Amino acid sequence: MDKKVMKFKFKGKTKNHQKDLGFVKTEEIKAVSQFSQPEILEHFEITKFGLNYEDAKEVGNKFGDNSQEKIKFHWFLRLLKVLLNPFNIVLTAIAVYNLLSYFLMAGDKFELIATGIIFTMIIISSTISYIQDIRSFLVTKKLTELVSSKITVIRLEDDEKVSDISVKNNTTLIREAKELEIHELVRGDLIYLSSGDLVPADVRILWSNDLFINQASLTGESMPVEKHANYNPSKPSLLELQNICYTGTSVISGSAIGIVVGVGKDTYYATISKTISEKQPPTSFNKGIKRTTWLLLCFMLVMVPIVFAINGVTKNDWISALLFAITVAVGLTPEMLPMIVTSNLARGASQMSKAKVVVKKLESIQNLGAIDILCTDKTGTLTNDNIELIDYHLLDNKNDEQLLNYLFLNSYFQTGLKNPLDKAIIQYVEKNHISLLKEHYTKIDEIPFDFNRRKLTVVVSNEEGDHTLICKGAIEEVVKNCTQIYYQGKVQPLTNDHLRMIESSADKLNTQGLRVLGLGYSAGHNDDSYYSTGDESNLIFMGFASFLDKPKPSATKMIQLLHKNGVDLKILTGDNEQVTRAICERVNLHVKGLVSGDYIEKLSEFELREVVEKNNIFVKLNPLQKAKIITALKQNGHTVGFMGDGINDAPVLRQSDVSISVDNATDIAKEASDIILLEKSLLVLEKGIIQGRKIFGNILKYIKITIASNFGNVLSILVASAWLPFQPMAPIQLLFQNLLYDMSQLAVAFDKVDQEFLKTPQRWTTKDILPFVFINGPVSSIFDILTFVLMGYYFGVLSNPSSISSDQVMLFQTGWFVEGLVTQTLIVQMYRTRKIPFFQSMASWQLLLATFSVITIGIALPFTPLAINLSLVKLPAIYFAFFTALILGYCIMSQSIKMLYIKFFKRWL
């Protein structure tokens, strides 16, 4: 790998996620982590460490400083783009027609009211989209506000610069450090980090002293990570690099001197910001709405000219034909779709909030119901995200109170960073009310933990003044300092057999996914008050302490519920194979296959798509690899949900169809999420998935049934236009009928959904809309034509075609208006379920009320004062006898066609 910085400069565009996630930058970080100090100097094209102010200015001019890139938000252009989507254009055209009809043709107030309704729908849908764009902008803005404003920088004059940094000169260098604004940092600057600092740039550590970094903002893992100057080839993944500190992380304890590797927009942190600010890939919901919109537009463009041509030719009145064709266009467009969708989603959001699920983006509710794969980390999802002491025992597997006492004293009295393992020991003692009286002991001294020793020693004195040295740490490091062992009730020399048994026991515990510590002790140092690492010798090995982030009691049930609902769970974690496999076994999550991040790096795009399909556990992953997995799954045709809570998860959250976070996640993760769980539990999420499917089912009902109904109406109009010497329905009647129907559909949001529909993921597809429409739509046309025959010949409207009076035309139109409205409204009850309506499946009371209210209004209208304004007349009593027979026949035929459709296509909605 070339060491020159220019070789890492990116020119042009790479493909897919590599561009989005700063592939070139991450490769440079990996390279710098492996360099020796002379190689680092060569990489930065300098001869010695420590830039002076003139050097810094020159580097800043060449490569940029640590200023955060200001991302502009074009308010007007974004708003214009939101307003000019195809569906809004259709709605606007309809509204313009209504206005022209009202002002130019002295139309009824209905046109004016309809215009107001349509413009309200446009405003609602556009506002929602615009708010999402603003939120995306604010996410990026928030990223730039997370770092501290000051940092300690070591700027040196030429005669002060050094060719290497070590223990010998670190004190001198630190004395020369001065505070600067973080935006003044440049590549190659030396900075001094100490406890409490936020890391302001990507930094390569050159010297450190017990440096612990909190990377929870990046990884979501609460365990602090030790950083030092050495490269560890066994941990090559980006976030495991032990000599690299990243922007946005924080120093828990210790100190370090490092060289700045990346600043401003060239940091790893900035690549995340750039990813969030870029346009989110379209979700299945977005694609479905777009396809449905274009399908409706194409259908309208085909049917409306046909209606216009037939009416113009048969009636020889092209102006009237044009107005009638425009009216048909209105009828063909489900203009209430945005409002129906929004009301369904809004009600769903309200329902989900009661289940402790907060919905930030309404459309994500439908996507949640569509997911067939859920990707999540195990921490906090399968486990409690709380490491616990689960066992402590001697080599002979016996629990020993003195061993627990020593573990407790070591953890309690140490003054350095209390990591989660120390906290787990203390909590175990307190939780179980074990009588380990710390007040009987006095701390004499301690030898802090450091990376090289990998152990921590505390010396305590009891009430008699006897000193005990207690050493706790990595098994192999503690054992190295032991010459004896407490075994089978006595202290005896440590033999090779003992060492093999200790190694075997530790391996067995590690295989079970447990974190393991060893403990040794020694006594008899009563005259000493100062202890050093030299005193960590001739220890007595006492036993083991094992820890685990325990599985949640609900995890097994949760996995079963997801499987039952057709959702495949895939674990994407940064943890190792042993721990992950052990957790999966404990919660009965079948491991179909386990793949590491390093293996994924070697795969081609085609190979990766195959691997992600066959395996369900992915370990030792960095954010780049998580994004690759999500992308591959989507390319395979899956709708993917991702649950994340760290800053590093933000790009992956954006990549998924549904991004899910939790209430205690980082601000950036929450901002990048569509859905926030108030409890990090998949049981809560399962309720959200079911709710999402209910909402999608109701939206689908409206779209399919409305388009089928409108198609049936248009077929009837075509037949009538070719057959009748007059228009079968007045434009005002057609519009009013459409409005009444649309108003009844607002109750669809409250309807029930068949359990069979809820059992599997439901994706938005337009493929089965056309078969549904072409097969089920003409059913209403058959009964419309029968109504034409009834009104034309039984009631004598067509008995003398050459002399049809206006009263006869109004009678004909009224007869079809009532029958058409009732069948169009009743179709919702017939088609809302695959079962037999009213008998096997009853609609919600809200939908029943809306349906039969509209039917009642439709039947009553000809007998009200409003009839004159709508050109309706009273119908004779005998009409309703035929009408009842027609409606009954319609219900029987629609149910029969539905059953045949289901038998052939194996699905309904």
Image (cartoon, helix red, strand yellow):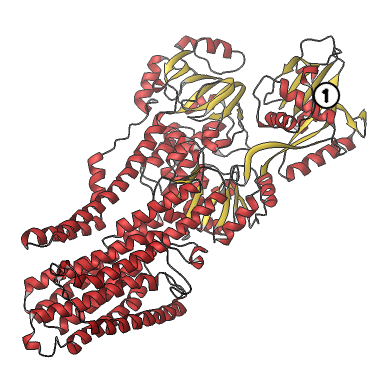
Quadrant of the rendering where the C terminus is positioned = bottom left
- Residue at point 49% right, 33% down? 3
Report x, y in % for residue 219: 55, 37
Residues 311 and 266: in front is: 311
Q: Inspect the image, locate mark 1, and give the three-letter code of the amino acid beneath it.
A: Tyr
Residue 545 left/right relative to 540? left
Residues 606 and 507: in front is: 507
Report x, y in % for residue 541: 84, 29
Residue 70 left/right relative to 92? right
Question: Does 185 appear above or below 787?
Answer: above
Question: How many circles with numbers are drawn on the protein?
Answer: 1
Residue 130 left/right relative to 518? left
- Residue at point 83% right, 16% down? 462
Residue 7 appears in the figure: yes
The residue beneath circle 1 is 521
Question: Does 530 appear above or below 905?
Answer: above
**Mark 1 Cα within 10 Å, few/some/many (few <14, many 20+)?**
many
Report x, y in % for residue 334: 27, 64
Residue 313 appears in the figure: no
Instruction: Identify the element where label 1 is drawn.
Output: strand
Residues 187 and 759: in front is: 759
Question: Does 519 appear above or below 879?
Answer: above
Report x, y in % for residue 878: 24, 85
- The image quarter in which residue 451 lies: top right
Question: Does 121 appear above or below 667?
Answer: below
